[in-house]
Image: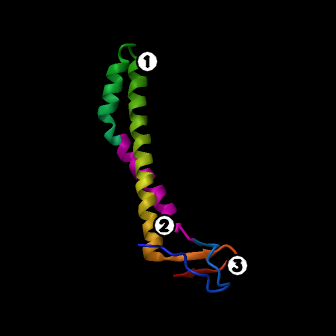
C-alpha cells in the first residue's frame, strides 16, 4: 500500500505537506505513563530479586536493589508503552483523522 502525500489545496504543492500528528503525541504520552505504571507494578519480582542480590551488603544494598529493580521496571515499561502509543497514535492520525498541513503556505486540510 503506497501512501502518497496529498497536494495542498491552497498552493498545489505536495513537497511541503506534512501529517498533523496530534493523536500521535497524545498516544506517546499516554502509552509512556501507562507503560511506566505497569512496568513499576510488574517489577515487584524484579525488585525482590534486586533486594535479595543487594542483601550481600545489609540494609543499604537491600534498599538500593529494591529501588533499582522498581526503577528499571518503570523505565522499561515507559519506553515500551511510549513506542506502542506512538505507533497507534500515528496510525489514527494517518488513517482515521487524515489532517495535513502545508509548511509552505500554512494551510491545514483533510485528505
Q: Going 44% across and 41% down the picture, which residue do you hit?
A: 75
- Residue beneath disc 3: 105
Residue 95 in the image, given as x and y percentages of width and height: 43, 74
Identity of the residue furthest to the right in this view:
105
Q: Is residue 72 above or below residue 1?
A: above
Residue 81 vs residue 18: left or right? left
Residue 56 in the image, given as x and y percentages of width and height: 36, 13
Asked which secondary structure carries label 2, the reply is: helix
Please state which of the two labelled residues, at mark 3 or mark 2, is closer to the viewer.
3
Q: Is residue 101 above or below residue 61?
A: below
Residue 60, numbered label: 1
Residue 57 in the image, given as x and y percentages of width and height: 40, 13
- Residue beneath disc 2: 23
Mark 2: give few (<14), some (14-19) or many (20+) Cα within 10 Å. Answer: some
Q: Going 61% across and 77% down the picture, which residue do you hit?
A: 14
Q: CA distance from mark 1 to mark 3?
A: 60 Å
Q: CA distance from mark 3 to mark 2?
A: 23 Å
Q: Does residue 4 belong to the magenta stretch?
A: no
Q: Quadrant of residue 54?
A: top left
Mark 3: give few (<14), some (14-19) or many (20+) Cα within 10 Å. Answer: some
Asked which secondary structure carries label 3, the reply is: loop
Q: Is residue 73 above or below residue 84?
A: above
Q: Going 44% across and 51% down the picture, which residue do you hit?
A: 33
Please state which of the two labelled residues, at mark 1 or mark 2, is closer to the viewer.
2
Residue 41 in the image, given as x and y percentages of width and height: 34, 41
Q: Which numbered disc, 3 or 2, marks the residue that appears first in the sequence?
A: 2
Q: Quadrant of residue 9?
A: bottom right
Amino acid at each position: 500500500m503506497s501512501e502518497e502525500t496529498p497536494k495542498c489545496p491552497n498552493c498545489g504543492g505536495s513537497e511541503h505537506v506534512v501529517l498533523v500528528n496530534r493523536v500521535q503525541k497524545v498516544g506517546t504520552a499516554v502509552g509512556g505513563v501507562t507503560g511506566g505504571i505497569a512496568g513499576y507494578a510488574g517489577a515487584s519480582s524484579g525488585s525482590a530479586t534486586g533486594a535479595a542480590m543487594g542483601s550481600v551488603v545489609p540494609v543499604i544494598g537491600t534498599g538500593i536493589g529494591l529501588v533499582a529493580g522498581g526503577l528499571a521496571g518503570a523505565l522499561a515499561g515507559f519506553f515500551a508503552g511510549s513506542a506502542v502509543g506512538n505507533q497507534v497514535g500515528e496510525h489514527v492520525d494517518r488513517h482515521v483523522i487524515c489532517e495535513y498541513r502545508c509548511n509552505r503556505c500554512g494551510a491545514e486540510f483533510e485528505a
